[in-house]
Amino acid sequence: MAPKEKYFVALSQVIRVVVLVIFVTILPGCSRSKPEAQTKVPTDAILLTGAGSTFASVIFNRWFAAYHESNPKSIVKYAAVGSGEGVRRFIGNNVAAEERVDFGASDAAMSDAEIERANNHAVMVPITAGCVVLAYNLPGFQGELKLSRRAYSGIFLGEIKQWNDRLIAQANPGVKLPNLTIATVVRQDGSGTTFAFTKNLDAISDRWRNRFGPGTLVDWPGNTMRAKGNEGVAGLIGNSEGAVGYVGYEFARKLGLKTAALENKAGKFVKATDESCRAALTAAEMPENLRAFVPDPKGADSYPIATFSWILLRKKYAPETANALRELFQWCLQDGQLYAPDLGYIQLPASVAEKAAAALNKIETSS
């Protein structure tokens, strides 16, 4: 290649990297709510503030807008800052006044230690549910990608590094896989989506369990790229050849990303659909504290990675706030569930919604 040609090839590569960096930097910011923006509240209205889960943010945005249309005196301001940050703001210790919230939202139910830091005044209410998918970007790849339990755990352990690795090929006979380096796309912020995915890895892989276990923030091994929020991860996957990452089903569907069929506990390869995600939750048993996980669901039709998403509430509020929160989330548990399928979420099983509604009714008013 002539020197001049080499120069322009190198220059085009630099431009591509710069554009990608700019895209990844600005996209998470575009996808979030803007907690800094001033919200004008009429004197006869009440403002409710919340923060947390990006996984549930799509349905939250639809819910809160629809609820305001029929209840104009109720205004909900929600910041999609990630589950970990949502829990921190909800607990409120060493949190700036402008970041304090009336409710948090997390796809990782609060631990006993977190509840203790909230002075044992926390009530966790399951409000929606969904699946975590493995979205990928393989230009020119034809067919439906299947990933066995050994394959996808090996990819995120950094042990499987090429798309044409034999463990991937075994589940995809007759399909030409590219000789392309795998780059995993993961969350850089504390995330309930990360917790749901690593909870599954913990259930299916001894090697993952011994090295990492489940968590909202992980020091990922291997060739990784990091992004903030579900939409940041989805955007990075869509713009990175050879990438695969975990993301809420609703975000993958929204951006038209291809998703893998994953091997479930019954040994079947299942894609995320409304039906397979719902099947994953049918056997979930909700305990008294409403903290339930389904890290490796049973059933041939079950998609293997599903999670509930919780609203975090205090046991006591001022009367006006308590009433407004109860009414808002009772609506979400009833009429709001009808929005779920169109947005890529799972309607809560009736038994779960009933227990969640009972928990809301226990919220008390302070004098």
Image (cartoon, rainbow, N blue to C red):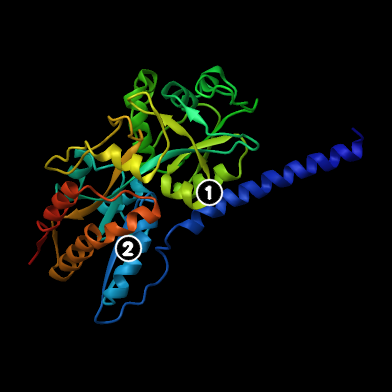
> Residue at 33% across / 39% down in the picture?
306
Seen from this angle, which residue lies furthest left? 367
Q: Quadrant of residue 58?
A: bottom left
> Residue at 11% across / 58% down in the picture?
361
Q: Is residue 160 visible?
A: yes
Residue 230 falls left or right of residue 213: right
> Residue at 91% across / 36% down in the picture?
3
Dot label at residue 256 = 1
Residue 58 falls left or right of residue 124: right
Q: Position of residue 33 (x, y in %)?
A: 42, 61
Q: Nearer the viewer, residue 286 or 89?
A: 286
Crowd around label 2: few <14 · some 14–19 · many ≥20 (10 Å):
many
Q: Nearer the viewer, residue 196 or 50?
A: 196
Which three-letter amino acid code belongs to the residue tagged 1? Answer: Gly
Q: CA distance from mark 1 to mark 2?
A: 23 Å
Which three-letter amino acid code belongs to the residue tagged 2? Answer: Trp
Q: Position of residue 40 (x, y in %)?
A: 36, 77
Q: Earlier in the sequence, mark 1 or mark 2?
A: 2
Residue 76 falls left or right of residue 124: right
Q: Position of residue 153 (x, y in %)?
A: 43, 25
Q: Quadrant of residue 324?
A: bottom left
> Residue at 11% across / 54% down in the picture?
358
Q: Name the quadrant of the C terminus.
A: bottom left
Q: Nearer the viewer, residue 76 or 358?
A: 358
Q: Position of residue 101 (x, y in %)?
A: 28, 60
Dot label at residue 63 = 2
